Image: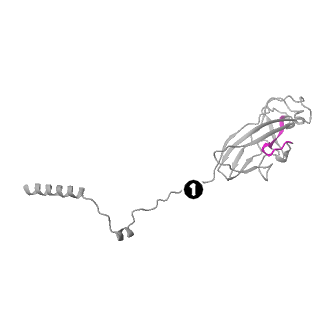
Protein backbone atom coordinates (compact mmCIF):
# COMPACT_ATOMS: atom_id res chain seq x y z
CA UNK A 1 0.00 0.00 0.00
CA UNK A 2 2.83 2.36 0.89
CA UNK A 3 4.62 1.51 -2.38
CA UNK A 4 1.48 2.30 -4.41
CA UNK A 5 1.18 5.72 -2.75
CA UNK A 6 4.80 6.51 -3.59
CA UNK A 7 4.29 5.66 -7.26
CA UNK A 8 1.24 7.91 -7.43
CA UNK A 9 3.13 10.80 -5.86
CA UNK A 10 6.07 10.30 -8.22
CA UNK A 11 3.78 10.28 -11.26
CA UNK A 12 2.14 13.51 -10.12
CA UNK A 13 5.54 15.18 -9.69
CA UNK A 14 6.69 13.94 -13.06
CA UNK A 15 3.54 15.27 -14.75
CA UNK A 16 3.80 18.62 -13.07
CA UNK A 17 7.40 19.01 -14.21
CA UNK A 18 6.55 18.04 -17.81
CA UNK A 19 3.59 20.43 -17.79
CA UNK A 20 5.73 23.42 -16.85
CA UNK A 21 8.62 22.77 -19.20
CA UNK A 22 9.20 25.09 -22.20
CA UNK A 23 9.69 23.95 -25.80
CA UNK A 24 12.85 24.72 -27.66
CA UNK A 25 12.72 25.83 -31.33
CA UNK A 26 13.11 22.85 -33.65
CA UNK A 27 16.25 22.70 -35.77
CA UNK A 28 16.23 24.50 -39.14
CA UNK A 29 16.45 21.27 -41.19
CA UNK A 30 13.32 20.00 -39.38
CA UNK A 31 11.41 23.20 -40.23
CA UNK A 32 12.35 22.87 -43.90
CA UNK A 33 10.68 19.45 -44.04
CA UNK A 34 7.80 20.38 -41.70
CA UNK A 35 6.58 23.96 -42.40
CA UNK A 36 4.60 25.76 -39.69
CA UNK A 37 2.39 27.70 -42.16
CA UNK A 38 0.21 26.74 -45.09
CA UNK A 39 -2.18 28.46 -47.52
CA UNK A 40 -5.94 28.27 -46.91
CA UNK A 41 -7.89 28.47 -50.18
CA UNK A 42 -11.18 30.40 -50.17
CA UNK A 43 -13.33 30.15 -53.32
CA UNK A 44 -16.83 30.26 -54.75
CA UNK A 45 -18.57 30.32 -58.13
CA UNK A 46 -21.27 32.89 -58.85
CA UNK A 47 -23.91 31.50 -61.20
CA UNK A 48 -26.06 33.45 -63.61
CA UNK A 49 -29.44 34.35 -62.14
CA UNK A 50 -32.55 36.33 -63.08
CA UNK A 51 -35.64 37.10 -61.02
CA UNK A 52 -39.07 38.24 -62.25
CA UNK A 53 -40.12 40.66 -59.51
CA UNK A 54 -43.47 41.99 -60.70
CA UNK A 55 -45.82 41.83 -63.67
CA UNK A 56 -48.41 44.58 -63.77
CA UNK A 57 -51.83 44.63 -65.42
CA UNK A 58 -52.89 46.44 -68.59
CA UNK A 59 -56.24 47.86 -67.49
CA UNK A 60 -58.04 49.95 -70.09
CA UNK A 61 -60.69 50.86 -67.54
CA UNK A 62 -64.20 51.74 -68.70
CA UNK A 63 -64.53 52.46 -72.42
CA UNK A 64 -67.52 54.14 -74.06
CA UNK A 65 -67.47 52.98 -77.71
CA UNK A 66 -67.95 55.80 -80.20
CA UNK A 67 -66.62 58.43 -77.81
CA UNK A 68 -63.36 58.70 -79.76
CA UNK A 69 -63.02 58.94 -83.51
CA UNK A 70 -62.91 55.65 -85.40
CA UNK A 71 -59.19 55.97 -86.12
CA UNK A 72 -58.32 56.60 -82.47
CA UNK A 73 -56.73 54.17 -80.03
CA UNK A 74 -57.32 53.36 -76.41
CA UNK A 75 -53.99 52.94 -74.61
CA UNK A 76 -52.76 51.92 -71.19
CA UNK A 77 -49.31 51.02 -69.93
CA UNK A 78 -47.99 48.46 -67.51
CA UNK A 79 -44.54 47.31 -66.44
CA UNK A 80 -42.65 44.06 -66.08
CA UNK A 81 -39.97 44.40 -63.39
CA UNK A 82 -37.01 42.02 -63.18
CA UNK A 83 -33.35 41.73 -62.15
CA UNK A 84 -30.42 39.74 -63.59
CA UNK A 85 -26.81 39.27 -62.57
CA UNK A 86 -24.48 41.73 -64.27
CA UNK A 87 -23.79 40.89 -67.91
CA UNK A 88 -26.26 37.98 -68.01
CA UNK A 89 -28.04 37.80 -71.37
CA UNK A 90 -31.81 37.57 -70.85
CA UNK A 91 -34.97 37.27 -72.89
CA UNK A 92 -38.47 38.30 -71.76
CA UNK A 93 -41.12 36.31 -73.63
CA UNK A 94 -44.87 36.88 -73.84
CA UNK A 95 -47.10 34.02 -74.90
CA UNK A 96 -50.09 34.49 -77.20
CA UNK A 97 -52.67 34.52 -74.42
CA UNK A 98 -55.79 32.43 -74.04
CA UNK A 99 -57.68 33.73 -77.09
CA UNK A 100 -55.25 33.83 -79.99
CA UNK A 101 -56.49 33.07 -83.51
CA UNK A 102 -53.11 32.55 -85.17
CA UNK A 103 -52.72 36.24 -85.99
CA UNK A 104 -54.07 38.37 -83.15
CA UNK A 105 -54.61 38.28 -79.39
CA UNK A 106 -58.17 38.83 -78.16
CA UNK A 107 -59.87 39.67 -74.89
CA UNK A 108 -63.04 37.62 -74.55
CA UNK A 109 -66.34 38.59 -72.98
CA UNK A 110 -66.76 36.98 -69.56
CA UNK A 111 -70.45 36.16 -70.23
CA UNK A 112 -70.80 35.78 -74.02
CA UNK A 113 -74.00 33.75 -74.01
CA UNK A 114 -74.89 32.61 -77.56
CA UNK A 115 -73.53 35.70 -79.27
CA UNK A 116 -71.16 35.33 -82.26
CA UNK A 117 -67.40 35.71 -81.68
CA UNK A 118 -67.13 39.06 -83.50
CA UNK A 119 -69.48 40.52 -80.88
CA UNK A 120 -67.81 38.95 -77.86
CA UNK A 121 -64.09 39.47 -78.40
CA UNK A 122 -61.86 42.53 -78.72
CA UNK A 123 -58.49 42.45 -80.50
CA UNK A 124 -55.62 44.14 -78.64
CA UNK A 125 -51.89 44.63 -78.98
CA UNK A 126 -49.04 44.68 -76.47
CA UNK A 127 -46.29 46.99 -77.70
CA UNK A 128 -42.72 47.21 -76.37
CA UNK A 129 -42.75 50.70 -74.87
CA UNK A 130 -39.08 50.39 -73.92
CA UNK A 131 -38.12 50.75 -77.61
CA UNK A 132 -39.44 54.35 -77.82
CA UNK A 133 -42.05 53.30 -80.36
CA UNK A 134 -44.26 56.40 -80.49
CA UNK A 135 -46.29 55.07 -83.40
CA UNK A 136 -47.53 52.10 -81.33
CA UNK A 137 -47.45 49.95 -84.45
CA UNK A 138 -47.32 46.20 -84.24
CA UNK A 139 -43.71 46.03 -85.48
CA UNK A 140 -42.81 46.08 -81.78
CA UNK A 141 -45.54 43.66 -80.71
CA UNK A 142 -44.36 41.79 -77.62
CA UNK A 143 -44.38 38.03 -77.99
CA UNK A 144 -41.90 35.21 -78.47
CA UNK A 145 -39.33 35.31 -81.27
CA UNK A 146 -40.30 33.03 -84.15
CA UNK A 147 -43.84 32.42 -82.88
CA UNK A 148 -45.64 35.74 -82.53
CA UNK A 149 -44.22 39.22 -82.12
CA UNK A 150 -40.80 39.74 -80.58
CA UNK A 151 -39.18 38.89 -77.29
CA UNK A 152 -37.40 41.63 -75.34
CA UNK A 153 -33.63 41.03 -75.10
CA UNK A 154 -30.89 42.60 -73.01
CA UNK A 155 -28.07 42.11 -70.51
CA UNK A 156 -28.44 42.23 -66.74
CA UNK A 157 -27.34 45.33 -64.85
CA UNK A 158 -26.77 43.49 -61.56
CA UNK A 159 -29.19 42.26 -58.90
CA UNK A 160 -29.19 45.63 -57.12
CA UNK A 161 -30.79 47.26 -60.21
CA UNK A 162 -34.43 46.53 -61.06
CA UNK A 163 -35.06 46.77 -64.80
CA UNK A 164 -38.45 47.80 -66.15
CA UNK A 165 -39.97 46.74 -69.45
CA UNK A 166 -42.80 49.09 -70.39
CA UNK A 167 -45.77 47.26 -71.92
CA UNK A 168 -48.14 49.47 -73.94
CA UNK A 169 -51.61 48.05 -74.41
CA UNK A 170 -53.51 49.24 -77.49
CA UNK A 171 -57.16 48.81 -78.56
CA UNK A 172 -58.45 50.43 -81.76
CA UNK A 173 -61.75 52.28 -81.49
CA UNK A 174 -62.86 50.79 -84.82
CA UNK A 175 -62.80 47.30 -83.22
CA UNK A 176 -65.36 48.31 -80.59
CA UNK A 177 -68.25 49.32 -82.89
CA UNK A 178 -70.28 46.12 -82.58
CA UNK A 179 -69.06 44.41 -79.41
CA UNK A 180 -71.37 43.37 -76.59
CA UNK A 181 -71.19 45.58 -73.45
CA UNK A 182 -69.65 43.88 -70.41
CA UNK A 183 -66.29 42.76 -69.03
CA UNK A 184 -63.53 41.35 -71.22
CA UNK A 185 -60.20 39.79 -70.32
CA UNK A 186 -57.26 37.75 -71.51
CA UNK A 187 -54.25 36.34 -69.66
CA UNK A 188 -50.75 36.43 -71.14
CA UNK A 189 -47.91 34.49 -69.52
CA UNK A 190 -44.62 36.37 -69.18
CA UNK A 191 -41.43 34.28 -68.95
CA UNK A 192 -37.94 35.54 -68.11
CA UNK A 193 -35.26 33.31 -69.70
CA UNK A 194 -31.48 33.48 -69.24
Residue at the left extreme of this rendering: 2
Task: Residue 139: give x, y in percent of width and height.
Answer: 85, 47
In what element is the residue under mark 1? loop
Q: Is residue 39 left or right of residue 161?
A: left
Above or below, comparing residue 26 to residue 7 in the picture: below
Residue occupied by mark 1 = 45
The residues colored magenta run: 120-134
Above or below, comparing residue 125 to residue 6 in the picture: above
- Residue in front for this viewpoint, 159 or 20: 20
- Residue in front for this viewpoint, 127 or 177: 127
- Residue in front for this viewpoint, 128 or 57: 128
**Residue placed at 60% from the left, 54% from the top?**
47
Task: Residue 79: give x, y in percent of width and height.
Answer: 73, 40
Q: Is residue 162 left or right of residue 182?
A: left
Q: Residues within 10 Å of mark 1 (few under 14, many from 20)?
A: few
Q: Is residue 156 left or right of residue 76?
A: left
Q: Is residue 122 magenta?
A: yes
Which quarter of the rendered picture does the N terminus lie within?
bottom left
**Residue placed at 11% from the left, 54% from the top?**
5
Amino acid sequence: MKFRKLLTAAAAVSFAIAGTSTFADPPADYLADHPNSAELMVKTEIKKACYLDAVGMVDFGEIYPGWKGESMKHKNNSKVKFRCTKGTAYEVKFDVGESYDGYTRYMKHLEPGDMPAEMTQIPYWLINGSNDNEADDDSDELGTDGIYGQSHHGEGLGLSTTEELIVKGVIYESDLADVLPGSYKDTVTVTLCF
